């Protein structure tokens, strides 16, 4: 939940935020006008929920001796800055992408062997799916009907995120609407809920499989309780924002 909350705050925190910024030419000031209230409310909700979670010690993991070299770190920071420029269309987005690949090969090309290709393949399948359904006239017509106002865009993005994750959902819906703020709120709030709601949720589950000390049933019960509680509360608050503010 913390990852979903924090990632929603910046344009580069989530892939779908990058898409929204570029698709609707959102300025940094405008973006943070949307994200700051969401961050504030989400943090308050998270703090309240933590009060009801039993404080149990976390098993310590073996420590690794990590040494950071100054030169690669500086180069990485420079490339990261170029990514920010690419997000806001200061430079073409392919420039930092190429620089990142070259930097990876220069620093340590074996890093490419440790990429979670299974997760990337999962999202690739989602993108193939949304590409296919956009070729079906009936589905295109129904989606277009659901884009008639910002509240429907908001609800559709939340509900679809529960099934195909919020990144593919944002790209799918973004082709049919100009309600950028409704899509922003819906896609980020839609990251809560199901396990496939966001990439962060999937990574948490992968981490649980590797280091978890409780049963899968208990994990899913706790995960679902906290996630859907957050989803319902934030969904109501987001609806009120659209109704009274926009």
Image: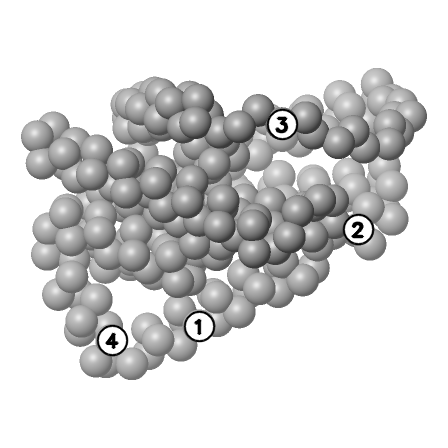
- Taking the spot 87% from the left edge, 41% from the top edge, the residue there is 108
Quick check: can you spot residue 160? yes
Contact between labelled residues 3 and 2, with CB atoms less than 8 Å apart = no
Residue closest to the eye, 224 or 97: 224
Residue 129, numbered circle:
1
- Identify whether 97 is placed above or below 124: above
Q: Earlier in the sequence, mark 1 or mark 2?
A: 2
Name the spot of residue 143 as percent of width and height, x first.
Answer: 21, 66
In the drawing, does residue 136 fall left or right of residue 22? left
Callout 2 secondary element? helix
The span from disc 4 to disc 1 (Cα, nearest Å) is 12 Å
At numbered mark 3, what does the secondary structure look like: helix, strand or loop?
Answer: loop
- Calculate the distance from the C-alpha at mark 4 to the C-alpha at mark 2: 38 Å
In percent of width and height, residue 190 lies at 35, 47
Among numbered discs 4 and 2, the one appearing first in the sequence: 2
**Which residue in the protein does label 4 denote?**
139
Q: Position of residue 44 (x, y in %)?
A: 35, 21
Task: Indicate the position of residue 164 as horizontal and vertical percent values.
Answer: 42, 62
Q: Nearer the viewer, mark 3 or mark 4?
A: 3
Where, by quadrant of the figure, is residue 118 drawn? bottom right
Residue 28 falls in image quadrant: top left
- Label 1 and label 2: CA atoms lie apart by 26 Å
Give whichever of discs 2 and 3 has the lower sequence position. 3
> Which label is found at residue 160?
none
Determine whether label 3 and label 1 are within 8 Å by CB: no
- Residue 114: mark: 2
Residue 56's label in the rendered image is 3
Say which residue appears at 48% left-offset and 56% top-offset: 196
Q: Quadrant of the C terminus?
A: top left
């Amino acid at each position: 939940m913390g990852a979903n909350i924090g990632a929603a705050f910046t344009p580069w925190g989530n892939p779908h935020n990058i898409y929204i910024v570029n698709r609707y030419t959102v300025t940094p000031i405008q973006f943070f006008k949307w994200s700051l209230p969401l961050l504030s409310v989400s943090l308050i909700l998270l703090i309240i929920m933590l009060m009801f979670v039993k404080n149990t010690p976390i098993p310590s993991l073996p420590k690794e001796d990590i040494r950071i070299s100054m030169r690669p770190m500086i180069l990485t920071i420079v490339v990261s800055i170029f990514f920010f420029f690419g997000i806001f269309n200061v430079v073409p987005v392919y420039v930092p992408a190429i620089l990142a690949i070259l930097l990876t090969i220069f620093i340590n090309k074996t890093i490419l062997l440790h990429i979670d290709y299974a997760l990337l393949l999962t999202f690739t399948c989602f993108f193939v799916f949304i590409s296919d359904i956009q070729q079906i006239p009936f589905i295109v017509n129904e989606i277009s009907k659901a884009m008639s106002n910002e509240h429907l865009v908001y609800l559709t993005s939340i509900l679809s995120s529960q099934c195909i994750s919020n990144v593919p959902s944002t790209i799918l819906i973004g082709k049919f609407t100009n309600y950028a703020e409704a899509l922003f709120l819906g896609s980020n709030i839609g990251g809560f809920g199901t396990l496939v709601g966001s990439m962060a949720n999937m990574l948490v589950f992968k981490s649980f499989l590797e280091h978890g000390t409780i049963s899968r049933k208990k994990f899913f019960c706790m995960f679902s309780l906290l996630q859907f509680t957050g989803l319902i509360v934030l969904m109501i608050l987001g609806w009120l924002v659209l109704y009274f503010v926009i």
